[in-house]
Amino acid sequence: MKVTIDPYAGFCFGVKKTVEIAEKELQKNEKLYCIGDIVHNQEEINRLKSSGLKITNFESLPEKKGSNILFRAHGEPPSSYRKAKQSGLHLIDGTCPIVLKLQQKIKGAYNELKKINGQVVIYGSKNHPEVIGLSGYANDEALVLESLEDIDQIDFNKPIRLFAQTTKDIEKYNLIKEAISKKTDEGNGASDYQYYNSICGQVSNRVPKLKDFCTENEVVVFVSGKKSSNGKFLYNICKSANIKSFFISATNELNQEWFNDIETVGISGATSTPLWLMEEIANQIKRI
């Protein structure tokens, strides 16, 4: 049996940067506090916890005065920076550079639209930490669309600036973008509509490569944390390209029956899936 790891799978640039920052800090200090899960992958979180990483939240921050606090790749709203300063913490900012740029774009758009009674619109998951952070740069007044059906919530009599969560599906974003364009072109609302492709290229460019990878293998094992929205999106791509695609988060979820009379197995993962975990799963499959 030939087992191949997808060469394009694994940590994206932003996640890799944040994990490296955490590892570097843990080499110097016994403890490092992180607001929320550093990545949406429990196996990687457990690895970093064994080195001293502590997952925390702002409710318990006053107890951590003087400690090092890490902001993860997803980013945080401005209120989080104020809380960290007020709590006397040493802030280490691991926000993905792409997310940082998007935060500033949204801040600029909000300041512009505030003068002309416009609205910031974000395509994303309302409860996703990145979107919560992004909305903070629009004074928590951004309208968040989770699907095409949600565009009815837009006031088309007001100027519109459309953005997207960096890990969303580019095709679905384009449908939303075009639907809003159609509404404005029909003269049903404001002509002052601008949109920005803020989806990370490392995510959107993976789709055609992932489809090819899935068709090249008889069975695909997709490795991801269950909380990862990027993982869910990419797994659906796998399933559409190869019906024999299976979602797992750890080696103990492998099923021997998946590999009966199979000659080629492909292993892929989300942008928050560490390479070491995919290698561990590949070795386990070879033993099977």
Image: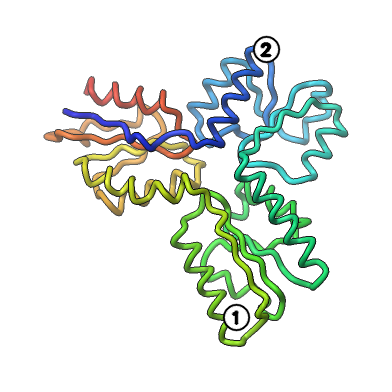
**Residue at 21% of width from left, 43% of height from top?**
216
**Residue at x-position 14% and y-position 33%:** 263
**Position above or below: 154 against 92:** below
- The quadrant of the rendering that contains the C terminus is top left
Residue 262, quarter of picture? top left
| Numbered mark located on residue 84 in the image | none
Rounded to the nearest angstrom, the CA distance separating label 1 from label 2 is 55 Å
Classify residue 154 by image quadrant: bottom right
In the picture shown, does residue 15 fall above or below 280? below
Image vertical order of residue 30 relative to residue 208, above or below: above
Residue at x 52%, y 64% (from the top left corner):
147
Q: Secondary structure at mark 1?
A: helix
Badge 1 vs badge 2, beta-carbon distance below 8 Å: no
Callout 1 crowding tier (Cα within 10 Å): few <14, some 14–19, many ≥20: some
Q: Name the N-terminal-most of marks 1 and 2.
A: 2
Residue 230 lies left or right of residue 135; in this view the side is: left
Residue 28 lies left or right of residue 14; in this view the side is: right
Say what amino acid the circle numbered 1 marks: Thr
Q: Position of residue 221 (x, y in %)?
A: 31, 37
Give the x, y percent position of residue 235. Answer: 38, 46
SS of the residue under disc 2: helix
Q: Which residue is mark 1?
A: 184
> 225 or 26: nearer the eye?
26
Residue 21 location in percent, x, y?
A: 62, 24
Q: What amino acid is found at the position of numbered circle 2 in the picture?
A: Lys
Res. 28 mark: 2
| Circle 2 crowding by C-alpha within 10 Å: few under 14, some 14–19, many from 20 | few
For the N terminus, the quadrant is top left
